[in-house]
Image (spheres, rainbow, N blue to C red):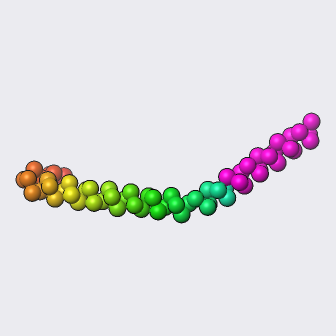
Amino acid sequence: MITLLLIGFGALVVIAVVVGIVDAARAADRRFVASERRLAWERRQQHRRASATASGWGDEDD
């Protein structure tokens, strides 16, 4: 019974290590995608603000 518990615990540790390695390997890709999305969002916000002020319907909260 104890052997079965140790095998299960060992399997969990191995899975955790594998997940950590895969996560670390893909972290740079996720940061790159996040920065690209952030730049696209900032461009949309600048365009939205420019069109709002050009039409005279600017947001009073700014």
Residue 50 to residue 7: above or below: below
Q: Quadrant of the N terminus?
A: top right
Q: Position of residue 22 (x, y in %)?
A: 64, 56
Q: Give the dominant element type of the magenta stretch: helix, strand or loop.
A: helix
- Which residue is at a point 71% across and 54% down the rendered structure image? 18
Asked where in the image residue 25 lies, by quadrant, the reply is: bottom right
Magenta residues?
A: 1-19
Q: Looking at the image, which residue is at 33% across and 58% down?
A: 40
* Left or right of 20 in this view: 31: left
Say if the magenta span includes residue 26: no
User: Is residue 50 rendered to the left or right of residue 10?
Assistant: left
Q: Quadrant of residue 48?
A: bottom left
Q: Position of residue 34 (x, y in %)?
A: 44, 58
Q: Position of residue 16 (x, y in %)?
A: 71, 51
Give left or right: position of 62 versus 23: left
- Residue at 23% from the left image edge and 60% from the top image edge: 46
- Name the residue nearer the viewer: 61 or 17: 17
Instruction: Indicate yes or no whether the magenta region holds residue 5.
Output: yes
> Most extreme residue toward the left, as rendered?
56
Q: Residue at x 56, y 60 (%)?
A: 27
Q: Identify the image quadrant of the C terminus.
A: bottom left
- Count of numbered badges drawn on the protein: 0
